[in-house]
């Protein structure tokens, strides 16, 4: 029958390393079996046959605290392919961190998301920063394979697809430690693995320099606004008349009127303030519904797929049928170069300025902002402001108080934005562009490392030895 894929294998083969006794067609997909067969035709080893430990962090009832008094609670959204995303962090008390001491992530650990929207994403934790892993992540330690090499392998076409093979659960996909420990890992010389490690280290250097330039841009913004030493009030009490509270905002919750929120808007008021709606056009995207999701098709970007640092490859796609039926709407909503993506649900207030067209559409939780007059406001400058405390505190004020944060478009339109001297905007924008240029170099090195491992698997180690060195020369 045309289009029908059939895999034939013995029951003994099916049950091998199949602790969940899966018989579904996805588990025996021909593509996965071919990849596995190719790896097993080379020198390989299972992590189960090494000193590898795959730790599944435990869970307790906890509350988040501020950064100064807490310890970083490392969540699934902190893992991106070969990157640690250390923005939008949350923190737990030192007491809770002590209770979860077995969840401590150490430098050089490989971290893998166990479940959720970005399940199976893998990175090397190479930070000198204390972090406690959540139960949605695995922590992998071994000394047989180079940890950098291992992290890269799980991001190659081979490693990633075999992680996908072992995923179970429909709406909330998961991966099990037993299955991970029985993925065939190709064995290469220590020299080759070290070259892969050097690629990652150089990539991290570029990221460090990139973050430094971005921090300079943030500092320049605050200095220009006279806010470099601004300390918002922690006083929870504010006295307002009914006219100046509900009559002005329609809100009666005490959280909304905390003095610190008022202080930040007052500070902006002295700096040529503009409402966001006067600076940009705001376009809403669509929400196709999970019934239109697919494993291939048109990329569908969700809030989890981007941060202020960039866009990661979406994990969801839209069916061909849905795309055909909504062709005109999709063409209208495809984000173009220059668009500022802005989240209104979940991690509210995250902004990213697209430096190239995005071949896909975004979820309804992401707004598309387009600067009306770039001779007045530079998009890179505005994006920095949107990600700064100046706007994040307004987001916290408007959307706070809910378990799942939702920032209404009507509130976003009223966000107060300072518009500084254009020459100073240019200075800030140049720092940001330098920062993202370094980030691009970092991404190039990560891609080179992946390609080197894939080439070694496909053509032999000798053919791949030059890849990492060439990548570091460009």
Image: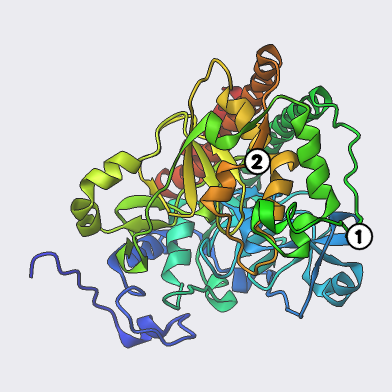
Q: Is residue 57 left or right of residue 46?
A: right
Please tell me whether residue 233 is drawn above or below residue 253 in the rendered image.
Answer: above
Label 2: how many Cα within 10 Å (few below 14, some 14–19, many 20+): many
The residue drawn where x is 37% and y is 67% is 290
Q: Which residue is mark 2?
A: 200
Toward which corner of the image does residue 99 lie, by quadrant?
Answer: bottom right
The residue drawn where x is 70% and y is 21% is 420
Q: Can you see residue 431?
A: yes
Q: Is residue 199 left or right of residue 292?
A: right
Q: Which residue is nearer to you in this view: 10 or 431? A: 431
Q: Is residue 142 left or right of residue 436?
A: right
Label 1: how many Cα within 10 Å (few below 14, some 14–19, many 20+): few
Label 2 to label 1: alpha-carbon separation: 32 Å
The x and y percentages for residue 197 are 66, 43
Q: Earlier in the sequence, mark 2 or mark 1?
A: 1
The x and y percentages for residue 43 are 50, 59
Q: What numbered label is drawn on residue 69?
A: 1
The residue drawn where x is 15% and y is 69% is 4
The x and y percentages for residue 262 are 80, 46
Q: Are marks 2 and 1 in contact (CB under 8 Å)?
A: no
Secondary-structure class at tag 1: helix
Q: Which residue is nearer to you in this view: 235 or 301? A: 235
Q: Which residue is nearer to you in this view: 102 or 471? A: 102
The N terminus: image quadrant: bottom left
Please tell me whether residue 368 is drawn above or below residue 149 in the rendered image.
Answer: above
Toward which corner of the image does residue 216 lie, by quadrant?
Answer: top right
Toward which corner of the image does residue 35 lie, by quadrant?
Answer: bottom left
The x and y percentages for residue 23 are 34, 84
């Amino acid at each position: 029958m045309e289009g029908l894929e059939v895999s034939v294998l013995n029951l003994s083969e099916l049950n091998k390393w199949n602790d969940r006794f899966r018989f579904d067609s996805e588990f025996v997909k021909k593509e996965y079996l071919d990849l596995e067969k190719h790896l097993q035709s080379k020198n390989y080893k299972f992590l189960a046959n090494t000193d590898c430990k795959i730790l599944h962090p435990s869970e307790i009832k906890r509350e988040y605290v501020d950064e100064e008094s807490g310890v970083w609670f490392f969540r699934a959204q902190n893992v991106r392919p070969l990157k640690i995303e250390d923005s939008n962090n949350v923190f737990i008390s030192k007491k809770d961190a002590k209770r979860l001491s077995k969840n401590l992530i150490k430098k050089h650990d490989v971290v893998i998301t166990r479940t959720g929207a970005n399940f199976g994403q893998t990175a090397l934790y190479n930070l000198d920063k204390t972090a406690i892993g959540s139960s949605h992540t695995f922590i992998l330690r071994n000394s047989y394979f180079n940890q950098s090499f291992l992290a890269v392998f799980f991001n190659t076409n081979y490693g990633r697809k075999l992680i996908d093979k072992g995923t179970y659960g429909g709406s909330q996909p998961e991966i099990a430690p037993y299955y991970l420990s029985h993925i065939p890992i190709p064995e290469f010389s220590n020299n080759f693995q070290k070259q892969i490690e050097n690629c990652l280290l150089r990539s991290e250097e570029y990221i460090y320099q990139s973050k430094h330039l971005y921090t300079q841009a943030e500092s320049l913004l605050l200095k220009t606004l006279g806010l470099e030493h601004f300390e918002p009030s922690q006083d929870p009490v504010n006295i307002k008349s009914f006219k100046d509270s509900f009559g002005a905002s329609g809100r009666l919750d005490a959280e909304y009127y905390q003095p610190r929120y008022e202080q930040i808007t007052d500070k902006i008021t002295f700096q040529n303030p503009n409402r966001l709606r006067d600076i940009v056009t705001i376009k809403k995207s669509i929400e196709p519904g999970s019934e239109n999701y697919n494993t291939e098709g048109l990329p569908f970007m969700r809030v989890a797929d981007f941060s202020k640092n960039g866009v990661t490859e979406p994990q969801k796609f839209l069916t061909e049928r849905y795309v055909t039926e909504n062709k005109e709407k999709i063409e209208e909503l495809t984000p173009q170069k220059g668009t500022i993506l802005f989240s209104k649900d979940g991690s509210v207030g995250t902004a990213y300025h697209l430096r190239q067209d995005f071949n896909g559409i975004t979820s309804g939780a992401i707004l598309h902002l387009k600067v009306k007059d770039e001779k007045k406001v530079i998009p890179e400058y505005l994006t920095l402001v949107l990600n700064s405390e100046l706007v994040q505190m307004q987001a916290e004020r408007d959307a706070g108080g809910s378990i799942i944060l939702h920032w209404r478009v009507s509130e976003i339109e009223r966000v107060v934005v300072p518009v500084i001297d254009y020459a100073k905007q240019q200075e800030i924008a140049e720092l940001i562009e330098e920062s993202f240029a370094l980030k691009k170099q970092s991404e190039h090195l990560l891609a080179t490392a992946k390609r080197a491992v894939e080439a070694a698997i496909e053509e032999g180690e000798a053919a791949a030895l030059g890849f990492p060195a060439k990548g570091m020369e460009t």
